[in-house]
Amino acid sequence: MNWLHECDETRYGWVIVLITVLLKLIFWPLTAASTRSMKRMQALAPEVKALKEKYKDDPQKFTSKQMELWKKNKVSPVSGCLPMLIQTPVFIGFFTMIRSAI
């Protein structure tokens, strides 16, 4: 960050904006994959709700049928959260860098 600031005499605010845009571009594939996964899960929500109504007295049976539904449609509830878990340490590091650079 200090290197960019010294390189072309850019103000720190614009350097922060530039680094933020670069990070968003780098993580765009992960964000897009997460969004696709969440949309697939939303599309299956009515079917999951129907399963919940059908097996409301048997939670184990509901869970097994829900897993079958997800496997059949190649959907994983973890795939929507995994990209965020990868990005979090990078953004924490970015915040730490901002605090120590200025």
Image (tube, grey):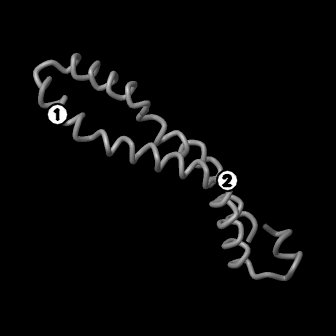
Q: Is residue 59 above or below residue 41?
A: above
Residue at image point 32% right, 44% down: 43
Please state which of residues 35 and 95 is positioned toward the viewer in this rendering.
35
Q: Is residue 93 above or below residue 98?
A: above
Residue at image point 67% right, 53% down: 93
| Relative image position of residue 22 (x, y in whole percent) | 70, 63
- Please indicate whether residue 98 sits to the left or right of residue 87 in the image: right
Q: Regarding mark 1 in the picture, which secondary structure is present there?
A: helix
Q: Is residue 84 above or below residue 26?
A: above
Location of residue 18 (image quadrant): bottom right
Residue where numbered disc 1 is placed: 50
Tell me how far mark 1 sits from mark 2, CA to CA: 43 Å
Return the mark for residue 4: none
Please state which of residues 86 and 43 is positioned toward the viewer in this rendering.
43
Q: Residue flagged by tag 1: what amino acid is it?
A: Ala
- Please indicate whether residue 61 sits to the left or right of residue 94 in the image: left
Return the mark for residue 93: 2
| Relative image position of residue 96 (x, y in whole percent) | 67, 58
Q: Regarding mark 2 in the picture, which secondary structure is present there?
A: helix
| Relative image position of residue 20 (x, y in whole percent) | 65, 66
Badge 1: residue crowd in 10 Å (few <14, some 14–19, many ≥20) = few
